[in-house]
Image (cartoon, rainbow, N blue to C red):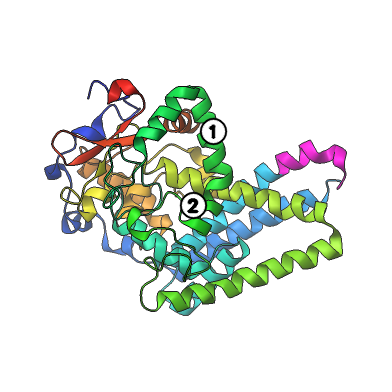
């Protein structure tokens, strides 16, 4: 452990033993049964909360002149509007997990509409995201933010760790960190949807819009191929709507009111996915070491503060609970987090580092992983001294 850059977790994740991880039953026994149940009225109330907030922000945008000299103000507006609009992503995300309502028709329609408006193919995402949950931090079967492996075999591991390590050292940590932030936050989400970038080796080059050749079909078994095509209809209608508004109001207006905030929403999505499954001293697992509960408890809760937790429905401060049982609604997940933190002190991960500091640490130092001497866990390497 001495060669590993320890984060705010202080090596806790590396010290966790299998006995520190509860079984699903032990987890369920700690949490009241009603926490596992969604309430349609409550879920709709949170949706309306996000709608109300976004409406106010939208009205603010309409008061700003659409002129080139106001571009700095429009950048600030995009940051504000995209941050508030992330609440819609979280609600849609709950729909995809079955945590929004017992009325599955209402749930599906809500999730489909919200994700389509954010140019996300709903059913395609639902499938890939379920794989991400099932195999969290599994080097072979994982989906999203699967690391490159030093001396990887190219069959069960992603190769290229040595080249990435050499590249990061050649340009310097700071430059590498800046590059990673740009690649992840700006290009990461569309790259994942279009090519499966950072996805698992098992699923090859996937495309969330096109579940057929020349892309891999591995991520879309059985009925999911049809569902991908159905997802495309919602996204296509949204794109048609964008062109309509461009022709009616102008390109600048659409960029200012929609495209800019959407890019910020995408960045928030990457932040949550990246930060909650990656840290310098959080290992990835081989198939022999992996279990569902072990992977789920490698999720990390982080301190986003009251405002972001309010706007984003606690998605970042209750991520461990969400990964163990994604059908728990967000309005119960925060209370459930308090209970599991107390019950499973050694297994539960919370990194108190401020979000900007944690993001910079990961961007600079989570370069590639290497299998430990026991052949069970993959540990992050950031320099040749760690090889």
Residue 230 image point, x, y percent: 53, 77
Sort mark 1 into few (<14), some (14-19) or many (20+) by Cα contacts within 10 Å.
some
In depth, the one of 267 and 206 nearer the eye is: 206
Upstream in the sequence, badge 2 or badge 1? 1
Front position among marks 2 and 1: 1
Q: Element under label 1? A: helix
Q: Quadrant of residue 164?
A: top left
Which is more toward the observer, 199 or 298?
A: 199
The correct choice, above or below, for 281 with respect to 82 in the image is above
Q: Quadrant of residue 169?
A: top left
User: With 237 as the anchor, is 188 left or right in this view?
Assistant: left
- Give the residue at mark 1: 179
Q: Name the residue under label 2.
A: 313
Q: Which one is nearer the viewer's eye here, 274 or 56?
A: 274
Instruction: Please indicate, yes or no, whether residue 366 appears anywhere in the rendered image.
Output: no
Where residue 246 appears, x then y in whole percent? 80, 61
224 is higher (above) or lower (below) than 251: below
Specify the principal SS of the magenta part: helix
User: In the drawing, does residue 289 fall left or right of residue 244?
Assistant: left
State how far apart marks 2 and 1 are (Cα).
30 Å
In x, y percent, where is residue 178? 54, 30
Crowdedness of circle 2 by 10 Å Cα count: few (<14), some, many (20+)? Answer: many
Q: What segment carries the magenta color?
A: 66-77
Pick the quarter of the image with the N terminus. Answer: top left
Q: Which residue is drawn at 38% across and 56% down?
A: 332
Task: Provide the secondary structure element on which disc 2 rests.
Answer: loop
**Residue 211: horizontal and vertical position, in percent?**
47, 70
Q: How many marks?
A: 2
Q: Can you tell which quarter of the image residue 201 is in?
A: bottom left
Residue at image position (39%, 79%) is: 223
């Amino acid at each position: 452990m001495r060669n590993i850059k320890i984060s705010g977790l202080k090596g806790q994740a590396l010290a966790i033993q299998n006995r520190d991880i509860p079984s699903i039953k032990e987890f369920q026994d700690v949490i009241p049964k009603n926490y596992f149940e969604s309430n349609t009225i409550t879920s709709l109330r949170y949706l309306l909360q996000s709608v109300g907030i976004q409406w106010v922000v939208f009205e603010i945008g309409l008061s700003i002149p659409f002129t080139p000299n106001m571009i700095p103000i429009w950048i600030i507006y995009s940051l504000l509007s995209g941050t508030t609009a992330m609440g819609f992503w979280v609600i849609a995300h709950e729909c995809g997990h079955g945590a929004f309502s017992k009325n599955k028709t209402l749930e599906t329609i809500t999730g489909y509409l919200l994700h389509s408006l954010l140019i996300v193919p709903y059913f395609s995402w639902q499938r890939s995201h379920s794989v991400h949950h099932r195999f969290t931090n599994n080097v072979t079967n994982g989906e999203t933010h699967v690391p490159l492996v030093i001396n990887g075999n190219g069959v069960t591991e992603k190769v290229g760790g040595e080249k990435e390590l050499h590249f990061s050292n050649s340009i310097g940590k700071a430059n590498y960190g800046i590059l990673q932030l740009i690649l992840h936050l700006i290009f990461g989400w569309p790259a994942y949807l279009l090519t499966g970038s950072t996805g698992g080796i098992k699923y090859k080059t996937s495309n969330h819009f096109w579940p057929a050749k020349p892309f891999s079909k591995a991520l879309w078994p059985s009925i999911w191929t049809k569902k991908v095509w159905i997802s495309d209809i919602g996204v296509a209608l949204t794109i048609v709507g964008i062109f309509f508004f461009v022709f009616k109001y102008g390109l600048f207006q659409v960029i200012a009111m929609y495209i800019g905030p959407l890019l910020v929403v995408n960045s928030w999505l990457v932040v949550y996915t990246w930060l909650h499954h990656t840290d310098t001293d959080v290992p990835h697992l081989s198939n022999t070491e992996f279990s569902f509960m072990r992977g789920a408890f490698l999720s990390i809760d982080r301190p986003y503060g009251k405002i972001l937790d309010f706007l984003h429905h606690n998605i970042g401060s209750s991520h461990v609970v969400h990964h163990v049982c994604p059908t728990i609604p967000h309005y119960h997940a925060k209370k459930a987090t308090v209970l599991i933190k107390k019950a499973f002190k050694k297994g539960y991960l919370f990194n108190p580092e401020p979000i900007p500091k944690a993001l910079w640490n990961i961007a600079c130092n989570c370069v590639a992983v290497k299998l430990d001497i026991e052949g069970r866990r993959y540990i992050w390497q950031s320099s040749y001294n760690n090889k």
